[in-house]
Image: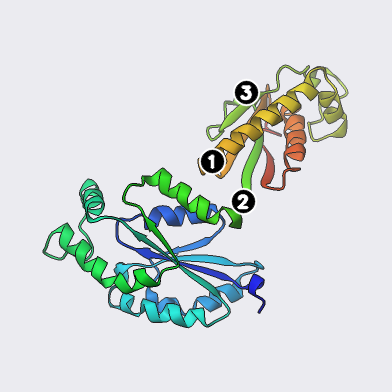
Amino acid sequence: MKLENRPELLVVTGMSGAGRSTVGNALEDHGWYVVDNLPPQLLLPINDLFAMSNQALAKVAVVIDVRGGEFFAELQSHIQQLRTSDISVRVLFLEASNEALVKRFESVRRPHPLQGDGRVLDGIEAEREQLLTLREAADIVFDTSDSNVHQLTNRVAEAFEGEAKTFKVNLMSFGFKYGLPADADMVADARFIPNPHWKETLRDKTGNDKAVSEYVLSQPGVDQFLDTYLATLKTVLAGYRRENKRFATVAIGCTGGKHRSVALTNKMAKLLSEDSEIQVAASHRDLGRE
């Protein structure tokens, strides 16, 4: 198999409390298929998962840690076997200082999985010793001692941003008389445009019809609105990327969600789709509701 076509497997492991769940969530946002708390003995059959994937470049991240119990000791040998296969294997190891880990366990009031009848610190030290060899063999190491959730998410983005740059935007038309969409990140108002409802030849049509779309898009101020709002939207989306937000819902409303907002949503989706790094979907929440 050619190197560039090799499936990718990322093993996420490391100290309990160092941020494995945060990393797993961030990887999902970057297009990885994430399996949390995979028993180490199931790591070798991962080839079957790649074989079932329809993606040309399948990417799977598995989160494995001492919760795997006695099987965790076999993890190192399993990784070595996979490295000799057609899979590109990397190990991301998360660590943090004893002080930072103790504070995190105390804040959530949960015991360390290895502390037994001892202290949290006893469990941390036992785990650190158990993971020493795996830590030394890791391809990537993150020390999260001084990182909060957002900073760690940003770090994952910096490490894997070249692997999934697509930002997903849902453009949604709606009618103000039915209420604002609860999940909208941004809302635009199309009611500055003359309402096709008052045109007898257009009243029964929708913004999906060519006649209505041409009427709406030809009105004074619409071109300026589209240019200005699109520029503003791209600035906001760029900021979202920097903050590791990978999904956004932009709602465009008119009175009933039938004419103006539908036509503008379709046009905005077409314009925004010209950016190859943005995946756009258009939906019409209230179309047909009247």
**Residue contact between numbered discs 2 and 3, judged by CB atoms under 8 Å:** no
The residue shown at (20%, 68%) is 126
Q: Which mark is residue 165?
A: 2
Q: Which mark is residue 242?
A: 1
Is 162 situated above or below 192? below
Name the quarter where the N terminus is drawn: bottom right
Assess disc 1: are there few (<14), some (14-19) or many (≥20) residues with their C-alpha within 10 Å of its C-alpha: few
Name the colouring of the figure.
Answer: rainbow
Nearer-N-terminus badge (2/3): 2
Which residue is at the front of the view, 32 or 158? Answer: 158
Q: Is residue 283 left or right of residue 220?
A: left
Which residue is at the front of the view, 181 or 168? Answer: 168
Give the residue type at disc 3: Phe
Is 76 situated above or below 265? below
* Tag 3 residue: 176
Nearer-N-terminus badge (2/1): 2
